[in-house]
Amino acid sequence: MTDRAHVVTSGEGRIVDLGVARMRVLADDAVTGAFSLTEFAGETGGPWTVPHLHHGFEESFFVLDGSFTFTVDGEPITAAAGTYVLVPKDTAHTITAAPGGGRFLTLMVPGGLEKMFVELGELPPNAITDPAIRRQVSSRYDSVPL
């Protein structure tokens, strides 16, 4: 945790290439001591993740550009720029980008899940959407593929 302002300007922050999307870390739990904030961006439509849930934390999404379908507990939610979606603990969810992709912010409380994406980024492209790989990597983080 820092005792001074943490600033990440445009083009800064750790970038992780996940194939279907890129994650930019804006603040991780080492900086905040409480949460992680990331930006996901990509030009590819289709699924950006597999169905999964988290037992120990909540995830929030704020769409910056493009359009996404967040399927939360079986309910599809169409989310265009300016839409906020909160996924409670223990709730199944997926993210599918509309054609052309887009960008969204992800707030994870408490933080730490960004480490899973860093690990997935070191694997073959699109490992994030491969159920077998995702299950193996996710077992070390609170991300349970369904």
Image (cartoon, grey):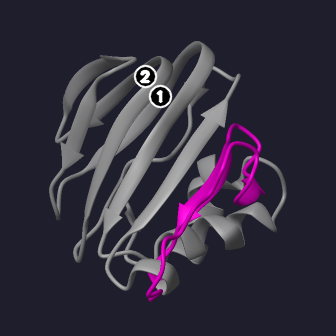
Q: Which residues are magenta?
A: 1-29
Q: Residues within 10 Å of mark 2 (few under 14, many from 20)?
A: many
Picture quarter with the C terminus: bottom left
Q: Quadrant of residue 89?
A: bottom left
Q: Amino acid at mark 1?
A: Thr
| Distance from the alpha carbon under mark 1 to that under mark 2 | 6 Å
What secondary structure is the stretch in magenta mostly built from?
A: loop
Q: Is residue 8 left or right of residue 67?
A: right
Q: Nearer the viewer, mark 1 or mark 2?
A: 2
x, y percent for residue 118: 68, 69
Whether residue 141 can be seen here: no
Q: Is residue 60 left or right of residue 12?
A: left
Q: Amino acid at mark 2?
A: Phe
Furthest toward the front, the residue is 4
Q: Nearer the viewer, residue 53 or 37?
A: 37
Judging by the rendered image, the residue that carries numbered circle 1 is: 96
42 over 121 or under it: above or below: above
Whether residue 88 can be seen here: yes
Q: Residue at x 56, y 38 (%)?
A: 48
Judging by the rendered image, the residue that carries numbered circle 2 is: 68
109 over 33 or under it: above or below: above
x, y percent for residue 90: 17, 63
User: Residue 82: within the magenta?
Assistant: no
Q: Quadrant of residue 34?
A: bottom left
Picture quarter with the N terminus: bottom left
x, y percent for residue 29: 45, 80
**Labels 1 & 2 near each other (Cβ < 8 A):** yes
Q: Residue at x 70, y 59 (%)?
A: 13
Q: Nearer the viewer, residue 91 or 65?
A: 65
Q: Residues within 10 Å of mark 1 (few under 14, many from 20)?
A: many
Q: Quadrant of residue 79?
A: top left
